[in-house]
Image (cartoon, grey):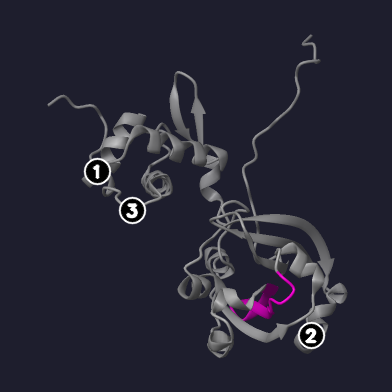
Amino acid sequence: MKDTGIKTAEEIKLGKINMPPLSQQAREAIHGYIRSMDLKQGTKLPREEALAEMLGVSRITVRKALADLAAEGVVFRRQGKGTFVNAASQNITVTFNPVMEFTQMIQKSGYKPSMKLLDLKLVKRNEKVREILRLPKEETLVEAHKAFFADEKLCVLCRDFYALSLVGGLEAYDQLSAYEKSVYPYIYEKSGIKLKWDKVEIGAAVSTEIEVFADYLREQETGVRPYLYLKEINYGEDDRPLIYVEEYIDTSIIQYHMIRQKDIDYGKIERR
């Protein structure tokens, strides 16, 4: 057999992909292959057809996976030359997109994560959030306040709002108060709904301005500290808004990075 220089599936430890969404699984498998590469020896990936054969999927699926990785800045696709790994992207541990849960971010930042549920209550009236989540007037909201820690040091404060029906109604509410983990798998367990994407507004705040957590911050005696302030609307698979979140993040602990594509208008510039 002719040696093509392409590793077999066994050599790169990529199994066949059978569960949807295939493009997402292919993306993760290719990302794993990239992490196993010695980038000092070369950054070029195998051809699309070779990757498709390794993974047991179609070239269309591989092409979509590579397009997603290119959008994240993990790879560069060069016309007529192939697909190359962006070596600079491999040092990035926490990104804005795709987004991880805070416990994952803290762990990837080199700390031991933990979380504490500070408050959980039912809210009858909050027209701002009700409008954001497109909920009827009779729907009761759940408001949850959480703190995340890195090696027991406070690094994130979070306020979540979502419909009571999303977590199984009043019957499941007591269980929720004892559930000190991410609410996303809990929602999936109770409603079969997965969160797929979010819309984020980015701002900044200092600890003395965070009124909703003012008492807790005074207890912690953290002093005046700057926080990255994110307002998020989380959407489900049917693009329906499901959770509204306000997050305050200490970026001295969780440091976000991202690769951005340039969109510069060179049309009116004359080279000399």
Give the amino acid type for the residue marked by disc 1 in the picture: Ala
The mark lying in front, picked from 1 and 2, is: 1
According to the image, label 3 marks what residue?
Answer: 19
Q: Picture coordinates of residue 54 (x, y %)?
A: 27, 40
Asked where in the image residue 138 lies, by quadrant, the reply is bottom right
* Residue named by callout 1: 9
Residue occupying image coordinates x 29% and y 42%: 55
| In the image: residue 161, left or right of residue 10 | right
**Relative to 192, does residue 85 appear above or below in the rendering?**
above
The numbered mark, 3 or 1, whose residue comes first in the sequence reads: 1
Mark pair 3, 1: CA separation: 18 Å
Query: Residue at 46% of width from left, 32% of height from top?
Result: 84
In percent of width and height, residue 113 lies at: 55, 75
Do the residues bearing badges 1 and 2 touch, measured as CB atoms within 8 Å? no
Left/right placement of residue 38 relative to residue 99 reads left
Q: Residues within 10 Å of mark 3 (few under 14, many from 20)?
A: few
**Separation (CA) of disc 2 from disc 3:** 49 Å
Q: Which residues are magenta?
A: 136-161
Residue plotted at (64% across, 51% down): 257
Q: Tag 3 or tag 2, which sits nearer the N-term?
A: 3
Residue 51 point in image, percent of width and height: 32, 36
Say left or right for 163 vs 123: left
Pointer 2 residue = 221
Q: From the viewer's perspective, is residue 254 above or below residue 272? A: below
Q: Main secondary structure of the magenta part?
A: strand
* Mark 1–mark 2 distance (CA, rounded to whole Å): 54 Å
* Amino acid type for the residue under numbered disc 2: Glu
Few, some or many residues within 10 Å of mark 2 (<14, 14–19, 20+): few
Local SS, label 2 = loop
